[in-house]
Image (tube, grey):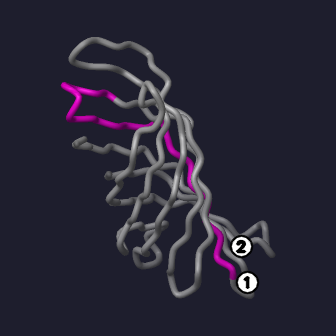
Amino acid sequence: MLGVGIGINGQLDTATEWYADTTLIFALRGGVLLGEAHRGTITLEVAPATNRLDWTQQATATGFVSGGKLVQIRDHRDWAWHVQVGLGVGGGYSCRFLTAARLDILTFNYRLYDKIWVDFGLPTVRFYMEVASDAKYNVQFVFPLGITWSI
């Protein structure tokens, strides 16, 4: 998965010190489809030191465990359109430990021939918080694009 977007950064103790910056993520994602119609999802996403929350700091490692549901828009024998809605929890490491939450509002999935899926989002929202003496936060609005091969 590759995603680009906007990150809003700041400190919790001084609400006036915040700034917006571009953000970038490259992550590997895998998971399973659950249920009779294969519409439930459980995914694991790992960004191995490739999640750039903002461009003033180095990229960091992050990960998420997510659950969601695929809502069918249109289905055909060889292809289908779905909207994915889901929540995730995770964290990362960037000099300090990060706790994180994720919300997929509109992630579209296009299935082609039951083997190849193309995912794109409008956007996925991720919230990170550093648990340190001066707690910092980052809200990422990422527009993801992913290609999945299913077995």
Which residue is more in the foreground, 33 or 12?
A: 33
Amino acid type of the residue that numbered disc 2 sits on in the rendered structure: Gln
Q: Which residue is mark 1?
A: 134
State the separation of the CA atoms marked 1 and 2: 7 Å
Does dot 1 land on a helix, a strand or a loop?
Answer: loop
Q: Quadrant of residue 50?
A: bottom left
**Residue at the (24%, 13%) spot, across then down:** 77
Instruction: Identify residue type, mark 1.
Output: Asp
**Where on the picture, by quarter, is residue 18?**
bottom right
- Which of 96/23 is in front? 96
Residue 48 position in % (x across, y down): 35, 72
Q: Which residues are magenta?
A: 110-131
Query: Is residue 127 positioned above or below 132 on the image?
Result: above
Contact check, label 1 and label 2, Cβ < 8 Å = yes
For disc 1, the neighbor class at 10 Å (few under 14, some 14 to 19, many from 20) is: few
- For the point 40% across and 74% down, the residue is 59
Residue 106 versus residue 141 in the image, above or below = above
Residue 116 among those drawn in magenta: yes
Magenta region, main secondary structure: strand
**Total numbered circles:** 2
The residue beneath circle 2 is: 11
- Residue toward you, 109 or 18: 109
Determine the image quadrant of residue 8: bottom right
Could you tell which of marks 1 and 2 lies nearer the N-terminus?
A: 2
Image quadrant holding the C terminus, namely top left
